[in-house]
Image: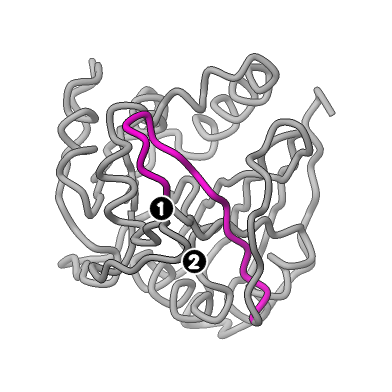
Amino acid sequence: MHGSSARTRLNGMNDDLTAYYDRRATEYEAIYAKPERQADLLAATQALQAIFKEKEVLEIACGTGYWTEKIAQTARSIKATDINESVLEIARHKRYPNQNVAFEVADLYQLNPLRPSEALFGGFLWSHIPLQALPKFIQKTNELVAAGGTVVMMDNRYVEGSSTPIFSRDEMGNTCQRRQLQNGETYLVLKNFPNQTDLENALQGKCSTLQYIQFQYFWIAVWQTNTHTTGPCFCAAKTQNAANQ
């Protein structure tokens, strides 16, 4: 997970995102056990497997490999990266019968592959990017993909009663949650919840097509990077509502 190495505290809470995900590694996937989210998780899995079928995928902030394992069932290959070795150690021990996954410890902003990938996936990363840093984030992700390639982001929608409540909001509009690990450590975690309009505005002029898939608890955004021949353009997002909505 992308984050600063600096460690600071606010009201006794650590706000180092990288440290948070390092400490949370062994309990991370408990979030996927929520009963009310199972239908969405199945539908999202099917959507991602269709999008990445036979594609060469670069996965950023892969975490414990929950989505890596599922996407690998249909993708041609996956290079899965994360800044934390602790989560990659868990991801490596999942089942990859196609033997098509390679792992690498890497910070997104330090990635510099020899050639761009055909497709890129970032699961539950967008929400941890400060609003003021989104232009840099989008530029970097687009640079990692070939012209006309596919970028896919998936993240949470805020659902009262299921999502962790918002603890605070800063002057830029970024929201944070207060999260406690099983060992009692508490963290102030940046977690934004963009809607479709927010995504369209952030991607204006930075992609040629954009599809927004909305589930009850999650969203998936799929866009194609601009080609060298057409230059920057933008098409309004095509919205697809999941069947269980």
Question: Image point 44% across, 80% down: which residue?
Answer: 136
Residue 129 is labelled as 2
| Left or right: residue 109 compared with residue 245 | left
- Secondary structure beneath label 2: loop
Could you say which is closer to the camera, residue 169 or residue 50?
169
Amino acid bearing label 2: Ile
The residue stretch that appears in magenta: 172-186
Q: Position of residue 87 (x, y in %)?
A: 24, 38
Which residue lies at the image location 68% right of the left edge and 74% below the top edge?
A: 173
Q: Nearer the viewer, residue 185 or 151?
A: 185
What is the three-letter code of the residue carrying label 1? Ala
Q: Quadrant of residue 13?
A: bottom left
Of tags 2 and 1, the one toward the viewer is: 2
**Does the stretch in magenta take in 112?**
no
**Residue 138 pos. (x, y %):** 49, 72
Residue visible at 49% across and 30% down in the picture: 49
Residue at which label 1 appears: 119
Element at badge 1?
A: strand
> Residue 236's x, y, as percent?
79, 67
Q: Quadrant of residue 240?
A: top right
How far across and down, in percent of the image, does residue 31 sit?
A: 51, 28
Pointer 2 with pointer 1, Cβ within 8 A: no
Q: Residue at x 68, y 78 (%)?
A: 204
Q: Is residue 236 left or right of residue 83?
A: right
